[in-house]
Amino acid sequence: MARTYLFIPGNVPRMLQNADVFEADALIIDLEDAIATYEKDEARELTAQFLRAHRPQGVEVYVRINAEEPLFSKDMKALAPLEIDGVVLPKTTLSSLKAYEAYQDQFDAKLPLIGLIETPEAFFELLQIAKFSLVKGLILGAEDLSAATGMHRDENGQELLFCRSKLLLAAKAAGIRAIDTPWTTLEEASLSLDIQSAKRLGFDGKCAIHPNQVPSINDAFFPTEEELRKARRIVKRHEETNSMRFSLDGKMVDKPVVEKAKALLESAEAYRFKRGKGQ
């Protein structure tokens, strides 16, 4: 489980070298949008060398590849021998997933992926995409989606409500991660509003495009002391009564509430273990 997925360009040595101090739970090394066409060979080689020699520990590591040929094949060949948690596939559709699976079968590899959902077409295939065997999570790509639809993003996030909700429901139905789109400015107030929009809907985490965004996302997706206190009381009463249905503070508590409380406590403990503190 990760709260923060930080994009870092695959052709900037200082960013790669500092990857393990940014406090993100997951890193997405980018070989796609952040890299100019004439720099992609260099970025691919630099990324491979870095991961062979200095793969960050204690964080999940993904690489965003290029979806089109011949870049796709070059990226996959470079990544095949590396220790990574998976790839991020741009503009994921059911068709591109089948092509990805066919490539994996050809080379007898099964590298999992996170699907980047950023085209109108993908929203008509979301449940099938989410249930595809190699998919372990979905990321909403709001910038490309906005460009494709003419949508105008603002800090209140109302324009993304349908897209966020549909992606979230598909991910939850498939039992995989729902990861929110990055916010494109470093201004703290608007970033906070965008983070809260994702958290209220139930996203598991959020992408970041700059290390300065990481602490805000980590803090927002870590349960508050009040949330932890309430969850502990629910679980304690459940254990005392040995029941999934009881009254607490004048309110009825049933099985979904108990399970949600348990999940919250488990995720908080996992985050504390990962970093040695509940940041």
Image: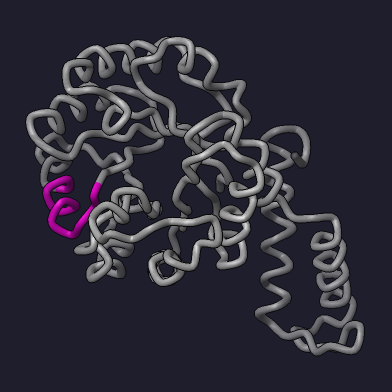
Magenta stretch, main secondary structure, is: helix
The magenta stretch is 91-101
Residue 219 falls in image quadrant: top right
Residue 164 falls in image quadrant: bottom left
Of residues 95 and 83, which is closer to you in this image? Answer: 95
- In the image, taking residue 228 as reference, residue 76 lies left or right, namely left
Residue lying at 21% horizontally and 34% vertically, measured from the top left: 66
Please say if 28 is above or below 95.
above
Q: Position of residue 170 (x, y in %)?
A: 38, 69
Residue 238 falls in image quadrant: bottom right
- In the image, taking residue 244 as reference, residue 145 lies left or right, namely left
Find out whether residue 73 is within the magenta segment: no
Residue lying at 15% horizontally and 33% vertically, measured from the top left: 72
Residue lying at 28% horizontally and 24% vertically, measured from the top left: 35
Q: Position of residue 173 (x, y in %)?
A: 42, 72
Indicate the quadrant containing the C terminus: top left, top right, bottom left or bottom right.
Answer: top right
Please say if 213 is above or below 180.
above
Please say if 255 is above or below 162.
below
Residue lying at 40% horizontally and 17% vertically, measured from the top left: 51
Of residues 151 and 89, which is closer to you in this image? Answer: 151
Find out whether residue 100 is within the magenta segment: yes
